[in-house]
Image: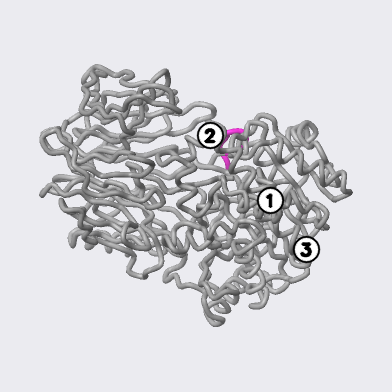
């Protein structure tokens, strides 16, 4: 169960995704039929190997320096991760480090230092000829540190939050300034949890965000004294986003509204809207900020389709130029600041797992090549063959009406060159449930489309990305109730539009999506002929209670206590009637009703969905004589485990769907994959390779 909770954060990353030149929602027969006709007119895609479709890129992170003159990136090579740097004026990059555990990059404000962040520590790397490279902070130990951001008041310093005491019972929180030599300065100490902070140009604390009584509070700090300005309900989004010249901060929030938007927070607590989705559909997905003063410069929305908006006329003019040169592409921008500064433009597509980067020169309004991501075999890490984009499916955003009248969203992927009416249909609910499908590349959906399946990805109510009302409309009805009815309604609507063979429909999902798959096979056997459920909670209510009893709840909730956040969504795990209802509607309590084959996948190190619950459910199915297969990888966590484990799961999905729905047969597994399956396929059923 992914349980992706919307929480306050510091760094946001923005993308513009355009599925086609002019994306439209398929909310009427004509629009959908035009898409179906266009996909059928394409050439039939050649069969692509699992390795090709599951490949990954080599770039872990890439960052433009604040002055827009240098680019640094982390690149994987085998089991190592390298740090590279290129001055834009030079033709060739140079490798700074041959091996680093860092997972992400930042620049110091003056551009003289690179900050390498791993799960263990923060290191500063000198890149301007000065000495002093070394570790400046540890993220492990008796106290816990977390990086907020670079310090806008200093040329080269970062802001960290330090917790004193155990996670379950901290005694104090400190806001620290740490320079590139590791010198620490306490900026603020607080008995309450510090969530975020903004400093003024002199380095004094101007705004503070902290937890108080289970909710977020934003305080203005005057002469060292904090004064509450805005209190945010725990179920609301409420994130500081930098400070304007007049001392008022920007805020990304859905307070006093439905969808999250960018606002200015007045000294009196008043919220003045700066930008919201012009289509009135989507929450803000990401912000792109100025690398020097942290003011928001671009706003991105990515729900049904993605849109990127500039907040200043000058930026809008340059954005229009970049978009005109890269039509129909998913773009991310990193703008540099100052004379001679370039912008870094990242190019993505739902039809490409690999990214490309170009440099944009605002003075000449030209793009130049920088870097193309090299494909790596996900299992071996060796160089791989790039996916041919022309052979991949082109997803289309959908809008349909549920049986109770609510408008819902999702995506459809059709196999190129095939008749949609005759294709088997696979429904793929997302995990979370507080998450949503976005317009981006997804290897499983592309693989299924390549095997001849139509793929439907519903963003059922309870999904994020479409506003607070859309998310809260789930009303805690996560059993065989309203949320699952959305999945069923969407599937039946698609079939009524001539998409998919009604006699060959399956449902596949991971985490909460796996739970939905089990609900579908249990309660709608006439619709769903087969289910594949990866790391699924067989009883949603039970797993919520289990999760709250272990340390993972602290990681999932991140800021607001998970139990508090759940109550904000209408879920009270202490409400016996609610928990009894969820259990009564669960797959676990309805084993006798299941009459469709099921494949279950679980991880022994899964801290979100306990493996014992999945094994118990599988045992009950087996004892009841049901057609069940179970794979348990003792080393895998909730994310699926190693690349070999992920490929094995994909092979089993292909096998199960081929057997039950008649899609393309999977390529035979090699010796390594067969060995993995022999070790981990605990209930092989009829899936023995």
The image quadrant of residue 605 is top right
The image quadrant of residue 664 is bottom right
Q: Secondary structure at mark 2?
A: helix
| Prevalent SS, magenta region | loop
Q: Where in the figure is residue 440, as x and y percent of width and height?
A: 49, 56
Give me the C-alpha separation between circle 2 and circle 3. Answer: 34 Å
Relative to the observer, which residue lies in front, 602 or 558?
558
Q: Secondary structure at mark 1?
A: helix
Residue at horizontal 25%, vertical 59%?
Answer: 310
Q: Nearer the viewer, mark 1 or mark 3?
A: 1
Magenta segment: 377-384
Residue 1 lies left or right of residue 176; in this view the side is: right
Quarter of the rendering occupied by the N terminus: top right
Nearer-N-terminus badge (1/3) = 3
Residue at horizontal 33%, vertical 19%?
Answer: 135
Number of marks in the rendered image: 3
Residue at horizontal 57%, vertical 62%?
Answer: 458
Q: Where in the figure is residue 588, as x and y percent of width and height?
A: 74, 48
The residue singled out by tag 1 in the image is: 583
Mark 1 burial class by Cα count in 10 Å: few <14, some 14-19, many 20+? many
Residue 303 lies left or right of residue 247; in this view the side is: right
Quarter of the rendering occupied by the C terminus: top right
Give me the C-alpha separation between circle 2 and circle 1. Answer: 22 Å
Give me the C-alpha separation between circle 1 and circle 3. Answer: 20 Å
Residue at horizontal 22%, vertical 24%?
Answer: 186
The residue singled out by tag 3 in the image is: 525
Nearer-N-terminus badge (2/3) = 3
Mark 2 burial class by Cα count in 10 Å: few <14, some 14-19, many 20+? some
């Amino acid at each position: 169960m992914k349980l992706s909770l919307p929480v306050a954060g510091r760094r946001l990353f923005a993308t513009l995704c355009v599925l086609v030149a002019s994306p439209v929602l398929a909310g009427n027969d004509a629009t959908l039929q035009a898409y179906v006709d266009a996909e059928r007119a394409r050439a039939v895609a050649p069969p692509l190997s699992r390795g090709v479709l599951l490949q990954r890129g080599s770039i872990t992170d890439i960052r433009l320096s604040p002055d827009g003159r240098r680019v640094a990136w982390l690149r994987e090579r085998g089991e190592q991760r390298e740090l590279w740097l290129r001055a834009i004026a030079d033709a060739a990059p140079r490798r700074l480090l041959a091996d680093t555990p860092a997972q992400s990059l930042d620049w110091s404000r003056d551009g003289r230092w690179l900050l390498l962040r791993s799960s263990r520590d923060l290191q500063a790397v000198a890149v301007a000829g000065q000495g002093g490279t070394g570790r400046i902070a540890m993220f492990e130990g008796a106290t816990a540190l977390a990086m907020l951001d670079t310090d806008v008041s200093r040329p080269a310093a970062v802001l960290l939050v330090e917790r004193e005491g155990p996670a379950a019972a901290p005694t104090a929180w400190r806001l620290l300034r740490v320079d590139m030599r590791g010198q620490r300065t306490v900026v603020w100490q607080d008995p309450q949890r510090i969530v975020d902070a903004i400093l003024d140009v002199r380095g004094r604390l101007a705004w503070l965000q902290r937890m108080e009584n289970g909710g977020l509070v934003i305080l203005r700090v005057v002469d060292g004294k904090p004064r509450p300005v805005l209190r945010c309900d725990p179920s609301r989004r409420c994130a500081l986003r930098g400070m304007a010249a007049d001392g008022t901060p920007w805020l990304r929030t859905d307070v006093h509204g439905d969808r999250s938007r960018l606002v200015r927070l007045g000294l009196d607590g008043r919220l003045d809207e700066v930008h919201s989705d012009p289509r009135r559909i989507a929450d803000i997905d990401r912000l792109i900020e100025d690398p020097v003063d942290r003011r928001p410069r671009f706003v991105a929305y990515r729900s049904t389709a993605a849109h990127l908006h500039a907040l200043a006329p000058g930026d809008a003019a340059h954005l229009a130029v970049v978009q005109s040169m890269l039509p129909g592409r998913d773009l991310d921008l990193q703008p540099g600041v100052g004379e001679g500064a370039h912008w870094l433009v990242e190019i993505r597509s739902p039809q490409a797992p690999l990214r490309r980067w170009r440099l944009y020169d605002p003075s000449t309004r030209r793009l130049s090549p920088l870097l193309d991501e090299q494909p790596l075999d996900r299992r071996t890490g060796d160089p791989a063959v790039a996916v041919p984009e022309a052979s991949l499916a082109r997803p289309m955003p959908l809008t349909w009406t549920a049986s109770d009248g609510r408008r819902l969203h999702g995506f459809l992927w059709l196999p190129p060159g095939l008749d949609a009416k005759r294709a088997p249909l696979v429904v793929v609910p997302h995990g979370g449930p507080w998450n949503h499908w976005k317009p981006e590349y997804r290897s499983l959906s592309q693989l299924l489309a390549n095997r001849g399946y139509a793929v439907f990805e519903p963003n059922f109510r309870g999904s994020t990305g479409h506003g607070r009302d859309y998310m809260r409309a789930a009303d805690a009805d996560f059993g065989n109730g309203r949320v699952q009815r959305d999945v069923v309604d969407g599937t039946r609507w698609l079939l009524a539009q001539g998409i998919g063979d009604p006699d060959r429909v399956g449902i596949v999902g991971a985490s909460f999506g796996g739970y939905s798959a089990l609900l579908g096979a249990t309660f709608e056997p006439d619709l769903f002929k087969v289910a594949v459920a990866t790391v699924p909670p067989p009883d949603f209510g039970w797993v919520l209670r289990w999760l709250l009893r272990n340390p993972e709840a602290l990681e999932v909730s991140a800021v607001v206590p998970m139990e508090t956040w759940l109550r904000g969504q209408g879920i009270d795990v202490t409400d016996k009637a609610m928990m009894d209802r969820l259990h009564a509607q669960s797959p676990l309590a309805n084993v006798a009703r299941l009459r469709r084959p099921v494949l279950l996948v679980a991880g022994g190190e899964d801290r979100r969905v306990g493996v014992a619950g999945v094994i118990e459910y599988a045992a009950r199915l087996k004892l009841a004589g049901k057609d069940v297969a179970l794979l348990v990888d003792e080393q895998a966590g909730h994310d699926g485990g190693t690349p070999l484990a992920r490929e094995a799961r994909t092979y089993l999905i292909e096998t199960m769907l081929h057997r039950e729905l008649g899609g393309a047969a999977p390529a035979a597994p090699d010796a390594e994959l067969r060995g993995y399956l022999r070790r981990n396929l605990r209930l092989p059923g009829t899936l023995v390779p």
